[in-house]
Image (cartoon, grey):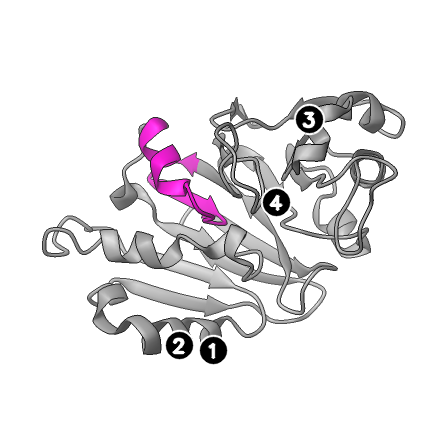
Amino acid sequence: MRVKILGSGTCVPSLQRSSCSAAVSFDDTVFLLDIGPGTMRRLLEANISIFDVTHIGLSHFHPDHSGELVSFLFANKYPDGSLRQKPLTIIGGSGFLSFFQKLSDAYGDWIDAGGKLELIEMADTPIDERGFPGFSVQTSPVRHRPESIAFRINGPNKTSVVYSGDTDVSENLIWLAADTDVLICESALPEGLKVEGHLTPALAGEMASRANVKRLVLTHFYPECDRVDIEKQCRSTYAGALELARDLLCLTLEGKS
């Protein structure tokens, strides 16, 4: 299993950080976690074709997490839709089907995937799970928006990746991330600048410690994070393997026998 950070930033324009997205790849699966503006360009830089993407998970509907979905579906139609051989599954939280219907009302057949698209709305319960060939996806609501969910992808050889999306402190996320190989966790603002619905490095580290994650990747950095020592702040609560996300950061998970 490989994890590539495609966007480590926010809604704030940046030459270094695209908006939120990560790609989890294994076997014939490429699972995008969020698809904020700049994702398709980063996919090209990561050597991943849009036609290789098999699944998209939306943590919530804010534009910096979902804003390139329409452009992605439109691009899949070029030149005549024949290049997409693999079905595409899009997964979202409560209200996702209504959200997508409104996009369809606005864009019509411009985002019609020609029968290759499956939409899944996850239940608003402490845990929902869907099985796919060779892996499973679990989601759990987190504290940000009414539709906000965190994702856990359980892949081959007992590998797992958890993606928080935007969240405040969340017991659901701690439970979902228990013993995971990688937790990709938002850390939007430094200590002292916390806002409701988001985490600081120390809070993200505290949840990662409680969940016993093997590696923590902090992401979703507002510009204020570039002016402080994010790693030092996180180390006040977390002693495990730690990465500060940057666009195109790549991690490889070996798995267990």
> Secondary structure under badge 4?
strand
Q: Is residue 148 left or right of residue 205?
A: left
The quarter of the picture where the C terminus appears is top right
Give the residue pinned by disc 3: 226
Which residue is located at x 68 percent, y 26 percent? Answer: 226
Question: Do callouts 2 and 1 mark residues in contact (Cβ within 8 Å)?
Answer: yes
Which residue is located at x 48 percent, y 56 percent? Answer: 66
Alpha-carbon neighbours of circle 4 within 10 Å: few (<14), some, or many (≥20)?
Answer: many
Q: Position of residue 164 (x, y in %)?
A: 65, 47
Is 235 in the magenta? no
Q: Earlier in the sequence, mark 3 or mark 2?
A: 2
Question: Do callouts 3 and 4 mark residues in contact (Cβ within 8 Å)?
Answer: no
- Mark 2 → mark 1, Cα distance in angstroms: 5 Å
Q: Earlier in the sequence, mark 4 or mark 1?
A: 1
Image quadrant assignment for residue 104: bottom left
Alpha-carbon neighbours of circle 3 within 10 Å: few (<14), some, or many (≥20)?
Answer: few
Between tags 4 and 1, which lies in front? 1
Give the residue type at disc 1. Ser
* Numbered tag placed on residue 163 in the rendering: 4
Q: What number of labels is visible?
A: 4
Give the residue pinned by disc 2: 101
Alpha-carbon neighbours of circle 2 within 10 Å: few (<14), some, or many (≥20)?
Answer: few
Which residue is located at x 89 percent, y 26 percent? Answer: 236
Q: Is residue 130 visible?
A: yes
Q: Position of residue 91 (x, y in %)?
A: 47, 61
Give the residue pinned by disc 1: 98
Residue range of the region highlighted in magenta in the rendering: 25-45
Q: Is residue 160 left or right of residue 50?
A: right
- Mark 4 → mark 1, Cα distance in angstroms: 23 Å
